[in-house]
Amino acid sequence: MATIRDVAARAGVSVSTVSIVLNGQQEARSIPAETVQRVQNAMEALSYRPSRAAQALRGKAGPPPVALCWVLDGRSTFFMRVARGAAEAATDENHPLELTVLPFENGKMDQLIRRLRNPAVHGALVGCTTAEDQRQLEEADLGKPVVFLNRVSLRFPFCTSDIEDIGRLTREYALRQGSRRLGFVTDARAMVPKTTRREAIRAACAAASISCLPEHVLLTENSVSGGYDAAGQLLSLVKPPDLVFCDNEVLAVGVSAGLRAAGFHSIRILAAGLGLSDLGRHMEPAIDLIDIPGEAIGREGAKLLSLLLRGKETESCCICESRLILSDPRE
């Protein structure tokens, strides 16, 4: 039985071009008429018949099935927020999708790519990739749309938090608290958004003469214990930072515990909020959060994917704003 790859080879085009023709998107994608004819001739010569999945794409068998791909690690709280937003969009009659979760492991992108090549999967929302995993996926010719979540891509559409806005919020918070020395407690295996987010925060704070010395940036295990140990290292410095930004709430809890054990209560703690928005007010020292908008990222990413599957013109990216959550709203 002929496959879509056989059709592409006979017509002398890419698999993605055949997919576009099968989905009736040639005009929207500006595919030349002669190319469309070559694809149609190849299908006839090979007696190729589109699968049920391809028919579903054209609206004959319900919403198109797509994969929501997320890495297998401890970021389940944030994943649930993203999934909630994606599901909200998928059940909207304007953006119908049939979502299936495909977990994967960093460093094993080839396995995920093989699963995404399944013709029953029409598109994918992909989050939490490393830089290398993202590169592999960008270079793979899947012949179907992919939207990155909380990542920036030069090839595929993406939906992410506003890193520059996070830098601005941190600077304003620091100035409000009178902080002049910024420190970071970050996952030693920090991936793309954490690394670039850290640089955006440093740049924004430097513009307000808030320093961030190399010794104030600590890489540690992404756990409560890792945060606790990092707090001890910061306090051993002659001039420790007076504001510590943590990659997530888990590290922030450890930092808070470490500062409390040493009797320090004046150092402010700010963390990227992934899903525990009410945590900070119950800690001492308290933890303030810059909320990363997981629901909005999932929702808008799913809308992008739905539009792509229907051959609609759409923006190549969507930037979602974060917000500051104070442990004491009176501040």
Image (cartoon, rainbow, N blue to C red):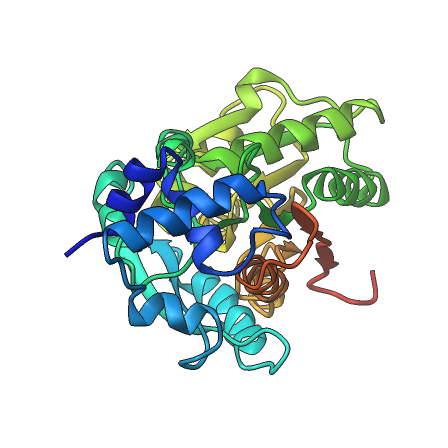
Give residue 53's position: percent from left, percent from top: 33, 68
Image-based side of 194 in relation to 173, left or right: left
Q: Residue at x 57, y 61 (%)?
A: 294
Give residue 196's position: percent from left, percent from top: 58, 31
Task: Please tell me whether residue 47 is drawn above or below residue 51 in the rendered image.
Answer: above
Image-based side of 15 in relation to 287, left or right: left
Q: Residue at x 53, y 25 (%)?
A: 217
Give residue 202's position: percent from left, percent from top: 69, 27
Q: Which residue occupies the foreground of this view, 43 or 96? A: 43
Q: Residue at x 63, y 62 (%)?
A: 300
Q: Residue at x 43, y 29 (%)?
A: 219
Task: Please tell me whether residue 274 is drawn above or below residue 11 in the rendered image.
Answer: below
> Is residue 14 visible in this depiction of the protein?
yes
Classify the position of the N terminus by image quarter.
Answer: bottom left
Q: How many numbered marks appear? A: 0
Classify the position of the C terminus by image quarter.
Answer: bottom right
Q: Which residue occupies the foreground of this view, 198 or 154? A: 154
Task: Please tell me whether residue 135 is drawn above or below residue 150 in the rendered image.
Answer: above
> Is residue 73 visible in this depiction of the protein?
no
Task: Please tell me whether residue 248 is drawn above or below residue 49 in the rendered image.
Answer: above
Q: Which residue occupies the foreground of this view, 6 or 202? A: 6
Can you name the residue that lies furthest to the left here?
A: 1
Give residue 104's position: percent from left, percent from top: 27, 51
